[in-house]
Amino acid sequence: MTGTRTLTLVLGLYLSAASTAIGADELAVPLQFGVAPVVPMGLATASNRFQISAELERVKTELPRVSVVGFLFDVRTSHRADWLTALDLCSEKKLKAFVSFGEIQNGNERIYRPTLRYGQWQFSKLGTFVADPECISHPAVYAVYLVDEPWHETKLPVYSGDDLKAMYAALKARAPAGASFKVMLQFSRELWKMVHDRNVPGLYWDRGMADIVQISALELQNSTYQHELLHRNHYWSRSIIHEKTPGIPLWTSVQVFGGRYGPNPGYWFPRERDGYHDLRRMLDDVTSDEYEAQHPLRGIMFQAWDSSSVERRPSQYTLGDRDAGGTPLPQWRAAADALAAIRRWIDERLASIDR
């Protein structure tokens, strides 16, 4: 997953699942929203507290019902003071945070991947964060990211199902006695492709891998909305998740990053066409009864609020686009339209529930 900025709204939204395969206690679940990172990796530092504070305030202004934001800390250079500064600012703003650690590999930023050495899982600064009682027990911590795309064939190491269970247990064991925290695992299309389509030996989903799971498909690419991609991913991934972990909170990402509007290859920023915004289509689709019947959503992450690295900013549109001085860039209009589409969709959902 690249170029993300994650922010989460806790709304009083409730989605009804249409299938009797889901228990009565799961038929209505609160829907949350998220965007991340608040600032690019490398800028989430104690010395940058004023920009972080201003950005958190801006997020609350643009999406007033937000309750959780995402931070991507540099696994090489970030330190305890950086983490606590970000968390303290979240508390001041009455927000909670998804905490993740990133690194650069082959010129691209990504979520840090733990390694196994001499029979022990090494978590680098993710482990340091979890072991620190003030950090992991901070009231602003919503969850920590364990791995992004664990079975992606181009991201090494690729982890087996047994590896994911062992990593989860090892990370939980790093926490101080009595500390309680949630671990998130993020898949793109791997559950659908590796488990359902290919049935790859050693790759499976089960209890004891995460406390929260997220799926994504990155549906706006190659100049079209890839609805079939979304359909297959949500239908089969949710079904696989529900079979083994029917009570686990499930999140999905909704793509809000990319290049200028098509036609062009690769990812592109959503837009309004024929009076209907791409984001409305995606939000309607991911919350449809067909997929809710497989496993209900707990949250939606708008990916991305800002680019995950400063270097991507000139070439990549994101939800929170503007230049360093606050002046609108040419793409700001697209970001403003996307924010308006999201707000309208949320307001309409709330209005339908009130009725």
Image (spheres, rainbow, N blue to C red):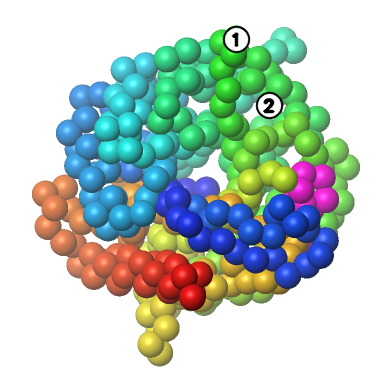
In the rendered image, residue 352, in percent from the top left (x then y), is placed at 49, 74
In the rendered image, residue 66, in percent from the top left (x then y), is placed at 37, 50
Q: Which residue corresponds to mark 1?
A: 177
In the rendered image, residue 137, in percent from the top left (x then y), is placed at 47, 20
Report the side of 114 relative to 295 (left or right). left
Q: Crowding near pointer 1: few (<14 within 10 Å), some, many (20+)?
A: few
Report the side of 32 relative to 69 (left or right). right
Considering the numbered disc 1 on the image, is that residue within a helix, a strand or a loop?
loop
Residue 328 visible in the snapshot: yes
Residue pushed farthest bottom? 274
Q: CA distance from mark 2 to mark 1?
A: 16 Å
Any magenta on residue 238? yes
- Give the image quarter of residue 167: top right
Report the side of 69 relative to 173 (left or right). left
The structure residue drawn at horizontal position 75% and vertical position 24%, both measured from the top left corner, is: 166
The structure residue drawn at horizontal position 42% and vertical position 27%, both measured from the top left corner, is: 139
The residue mark sitting in front, 2 or 1, is 1
